[in-house]
Every structure is written in structure tokens, then in C-alpha cells.
Image: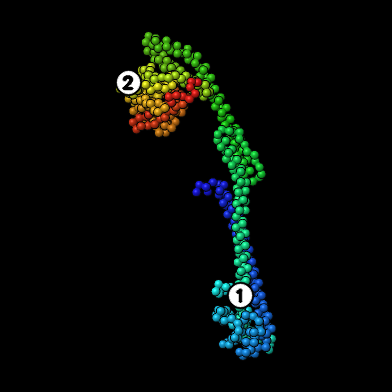
Amino acid sequence: MRLLSGLRPRLILAFAAMTIIGAAAAAGASYVSARNAILEAVQDAAMNQLKDRVSSYGRPLSTPPTQEQLNDFAGSLRLNAVAVYRNLRSVNGPDLTIFSPELRKTVAEDLHIQFQRLDRDAKPELLVGMPVLAPQPNGAMRASGVEVYSLTSLVQQQQAIDELAKYAWQMAALALPLAAALALLAARQVLRPVRALNTAAAQLGEGRLDVRLPAKGSDELAELVTTFNNTAAELERTVGELKAMEADARRFVADVSHELRTPLAAMNAVTDVLDEDAEALPPDTAVAARLVSGETRRLTRLVQDLVEISRFDAGRAELVLDEWDLATAIRDSLDARGWRDGEDLVTDLPEGVLARVDRRRLDLIVANLVGNAFRHGEAPVEVRLRADGDGVTLEVDDHGPGIDPEVLPHVFDRFTKADTARARSEGSGLGLAIALENARLHGGDITAANTGRGARFVLRLPRRTEGGAR
């Protein structure tokens, strides 16, 4: 069935079927026309011959005729005919039972010659019957009561018709290879631009926005090619504009982020001093100082994340790979942020799971995943490390409400908020996006799901990255 599912086989079958049907119809029409012509010719000849003979030899008949007169009349016709008058019939000629009662009744009631074709013993025959007319004193003609019936064999004509039918079907059969050749040619002509369009569409889907096709002719396919070219040109223009706008936006973010680093460094130095002296300041001033200090740290983190994400966008992020015991590396990341085993944190970090990773980037991944679990989930947070064939798996589970199903597909998008009701959060909204970019830089991935008891983030990394350090 799959062989008939393509457009090419269906076109070939359709064209071949139409050609064969046309050839068969022409052959059939020719056969019927020739058959009717042959039968009408022999029928007209037999009827005209009988009328002429009866007209020539029927005048001397008396009414009613004697048996001898009927015999002489039938013999003078020199045809395979029989003459009949009521219960009398000539001794020569065919048997009257051959002629149907309907034919005999029509001949008796009508003044015109009648005919009938039938097959008797698988042999076709032509039966002709006519009344013998007698003139009246007023010049009119009336039936004399004498009827003549003749029988003509159609065997030769049937043989000629059979030969004609054989030749007709042979010609129809010879049309089959011609039909197949015409179908292939027609399908090729129709499918060639379709294949070109398919190839061009595939190239367009692969990002070759400059692909175009030559438009030939003025038919529907040429119009389709023109429409495709116009669509591709408009798509190339639109994508070019979008890329230019995206590049400008990324360059702007990177430039702003870099420009903010210097004043933020100075601000952080000032806020450090304010934090140290906050206890000695008046209460209102101390609150303001702590507020400025907190917002400055938040702004610093946002700028750092923007700088990091701009490196990924620009393709300048680099890996510095080395072989590490992942249990030690992950535990160091947790300890550096004050996260230790206890009621709030449960770890399962078996020793001896080695992999080549960028220690700094792994630290960022762990900090973002575990920090996200603490901020948006509920304790205890579980961290489990497993060796998985040629890779390693790190699972981070929390026992909170889980991730909103509407947010889950976009949880790794930039500036996605887990709690949309909160206008602001401690994070920059870029943490999970940066964690995913770092995982992919290692040749790995991060997935998120709900377990029914909270949210689960799974980091998968290969033990060796392709191409080594970059």
C-alpha cells in the first residue's frame, strides 16, 4: 500500500487509467459502429432482394393461390424462402416454426416488410417476413393474404465481427505501454517543479533564506513558484531585521552591563562601609543604609548574570575542563553558601564519581538549582548524585507546591517568574537560564518536572566532553 501513497504513483496510475479507458472506449465505439454497419448492410440487402423478387414474381398469383402456385412462387424467388397462405405453405424453404409468432402476427397485420435477428444453435440468422400485396381497382394496394418468409445465415458476418472485435482489443492492449510511457512523461513534467519546491522548502527550513527558484511559464505551478519566491524574500527580509534588532539588543545589554560594573564596584565598596557602620547610625539612617546595600547587591547580581548571558549569546563562553570528584565539587559549592546536611538539606553524594567539568560553571549550576529549591520550594531539599553509564545525573528535589503547569514549559526561559503574583524576587530571573546554558556547554542538559510532592530538577552531564577543553 505504501507504493501507492506517493504523488508520483498516483499520477502515473491516473494518467495510465485515463489513456487505457480512452483507448478501450475508442476501440469499443469502433467495434459497435462497424458491427452495426455490417449487420445493417446484410439486413438491407436481404430485405431489398426479397422485396424485389416478390414484386417481380408475386403479381401472377391468384387469390386464393393453389398449392402448386405457392410452390412455384417460392421456387421462383430463388431464396431460402417459404410462401404461406393461411393453412397452405410451399413445400420448399425453411421451417415455419423458426419464425416467431410475434413476427408472423406483425407481418399479417402490417403492409411493410419486417425482420428479426436471432441465434439458433449458436449460429446468428436474419429472419425477414413480408406480405404479398395485390392492387385494387382504385390503384391502392392491399394484403393478398400470401406471406413470404426468408432466412439468411449471418455466420460469415459474425466471423467478420469477431475478427474486428479481436483486432479492436488487440489495439487497446497495445495502448497499455504507450499509456504507461505517456503517464511517466506527464508525471515527470508535473512533479519536477513540485520536487524543486520541496527541496527549496527544505533548504529554507534549514536556514538558507536566500534560496530561490526560477519561474518558468505562466501556469499554476509557475504562480506557485513565484509565490514561494516572494514568501522566501519577505521571510529573509523579516528575519534579517529581527536578527539585526536582536544583535543590537544583545550588544546594548552587554555594553550597559559592562559599563555598570565599574560604578557598581564603587557602590559595593561604599555599601560595605555602610554595613559595618550601620549599628552606629541613627535607626532611620541604618534602615536606609541596609536597603541601599541590599538593592546594590541585587543590582550587582543582575549585572553579573547579564554579563554571563551576553557571553553565551556572543558565543564567547569557554570551558576550562579538569577531572573532578563530583561529590567533593558539589559539597564545596553547598558549603560555600552555608548549605549543610540537616533538617533543611539532605544529600546523597557518593564518592568516586569522576567527570571532566568546568568547576566554576558546575558551581553556578549547583548554586542555581539548590538556591531555586530553597527560594520557591519547601524543606527538606534533597540532592542526589548518580553515575549513569557514560554520564552522571544530579537530582535536586524540594517538598514545596511544585511548579505551576503553565510556567513549567517556560521555567528555563529568561526572566521567567515562578510566582507571577510577586512583582520582584531575590533572583535576577536569569539563574535557571544560565544553569541550562552551562549544562549545554558541557554537552549535557537540565530538565524540570513535578513529582507530586514538589519540584524536581535533573542535571545530566557526560563524563567527557567532546573536543576536550576550549
Instruction: Tell whether 54 sits left or right of 317.
Output: right
Q: Which residue is nearer to you in this view: 212 or 8?
A: 8
Q: Distance between the residues labelled 2 and 1?
A: 116 Å
Task: Work out whether 202 lies above or below 148.
Answer: above
Residue at 60% over, 72% down: 155
Nearer the observer, disc 2 or disc 1?
1
Q: Which amino acid does label 2 sit on?
A: Asp
Q: Is residue 313 left or right of residue 84?
A: left
Q: Which residue is drawn at 40% across and 30% down?
A: 448
Residue depicted at 45% across the width and 24% down the height: 464
Q: Tell me where residue 385 appears, x and y as whole percent.
A: 37, 25
Is residue 261 depicted above or below 212 in this figure?
Answer: above
Residue 236 percent across, percent down from the top left: 59, 33
Q: Quadrant of residue 100?
A: bottom right
Depth check: give the residue in front, 351 or 300: 351
> Which residue is at a point 42% across and 29% down the rendered structure image?
447
Name the residue beneath numbered marker 2.
Answer: 341
The answer to whether any part of residue 372 appears in the image is no
Q: Is mark 1 on a helix, strand or loop?
A: strand
Q: Residues within 10 Å of mark 2 (few under 14, many from 20)?
A: some
- Asked if one can make out residue 78 in the rendered structure from this viewpoint, the answer is yes
Q: Is residue 122 above or below residue 439?
A: below
Mark 1, residue position? 153
In this picture, is 203 found above or below 9? above
Residue 341, percent across and down? 32, 20
Of mark 2 and mark 1, the one earlier in the sequence is: 1
